[in-house]
Amino acid sequence: MNNKKLSFIIPCYGSEKTIISVIEEIIYTVSYKNPYEIVCVNDSSPDGVYKVLKDLAEKNENIKILNLAKNFGQHNAIMAGYRHITGDIIISLDDDGQTPAKECYKLINALNDDKDVIYARYLEKKHSLFKNLGSKMAAWMGRLLLNVPKGLYISSYFDCKRYVIDEIVKYENPYSYLGGLIVRATKKIGNVDINHRAREVGETGYTFNKLLSLWLNGFTAFSVKPLRIATILGIVCSLFGFIYGIWTIIKKIFISSNSPMGYSSMMAALMFIGGILMLMLGLIGEYIGRIYISINNAPQYVIREKINFDTQDQKEKV
């Protein structure tokens, strides 16, 4: 691995106070071992992280900056970085310092003929309760919808071979979900245990709305199983309705001809079936809406400015 060039991809949002230590840790770890580049993607961060990145890039040409025109989300920002890398091994990590760059060689050394992608698996997660819950939901969704192997832990800290990235960047729709793209590209995926640090500064940028949007990307962009589940629920509801109708007729004829119609049970059934129908219509509408946006060529990202990229590094914008 000593002759391999390493490309580090860091999506940056709200990390003005942490990004310097992250980049310094990368440089200290790899600068005497491998040629490297650090591609930082400013996802229209509201703080002063872009100025910090520009100052760092002026001092080190291996630090390259992509400044996005607006906030496109973490996964789309990473996709922008992937289209501008020149390395042989690509390492994705967070900008908050919780994913220790000094342990990157644990991931790099685990790449071999049997493994194309290595995810960091944390011995003890130091996320907030909300973020841990979101991670568990994402893991459950991955197993259910994306056929992620049971026992495989998917995190934001991982490395992979160049050919995997070359395959991933063929995806040009605006709803990126890296877990789905990677699982679609290769099944040779593994885990390595890594220490996870507690957050020292600030709070996670993942709000409930952002997590929900990410889950919807996974649901609708890489699987039709939700539509199949909707079909099964429709069949089950119809079957229960048919059985209940038969039971009502039998009860009326053979048990009690004067039995009053149950208002409560009827309303409960109507509310249940109506809720299921509205849920399924909303799901179908979500699929149709995303198809409409995709065929209208909505951008995956828009780059406002590039720093330290040579002409040879430039690739087509999406």
Image (cartoon, rainbow, N blue to C red):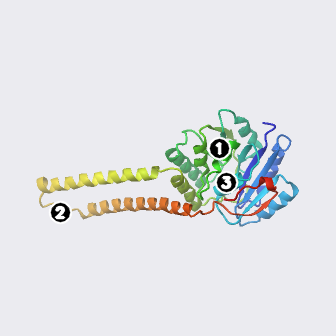
Q: Residues within 10 Å of mark 3 (few under 14, many from 20)?
A: many
Whether residue 205 is visible, yes or no, is yes
Quarter of the image where one finds residue 217: bottom right
Residue drawn at point x = 46 percent, y = 49 percent: 225
Task: Estimate the spatial distance between the alpha carbons at disc 1 and disc 2, rounded to whole Å.
Answer: 60 Å
Under circle 2, the secondary element is: loop
Under circle 1, the secondary element is: loop
- Residue 67 % position (x, y): 74, 62
Query: 164 or 49, which is in the foreground?
Result: 164
Residue drawn at point x = 25 percent, y = 53 percent: 242
Q: Residues within 10 Å of mark 1 (few under 14, many from 20)?
A: few
Identify the residue under disc 3: 79
Q: Which mark is residue 124?
A: 1
Identify the residue under disc 2: 260
Q: Name the residue type under label 1.
A: Glu
Number of numbered discs on residues? 3
Q: Is residue 109 depicted above or below 272 in this figure?
A: above
Q: Name the residue type under label 3.
A: Met
Q: Earlier in the sequence, mark 2 or mark 3?
A: 3
Q: Earlier in the sequence, mark 1 or mark 2?
A: 1
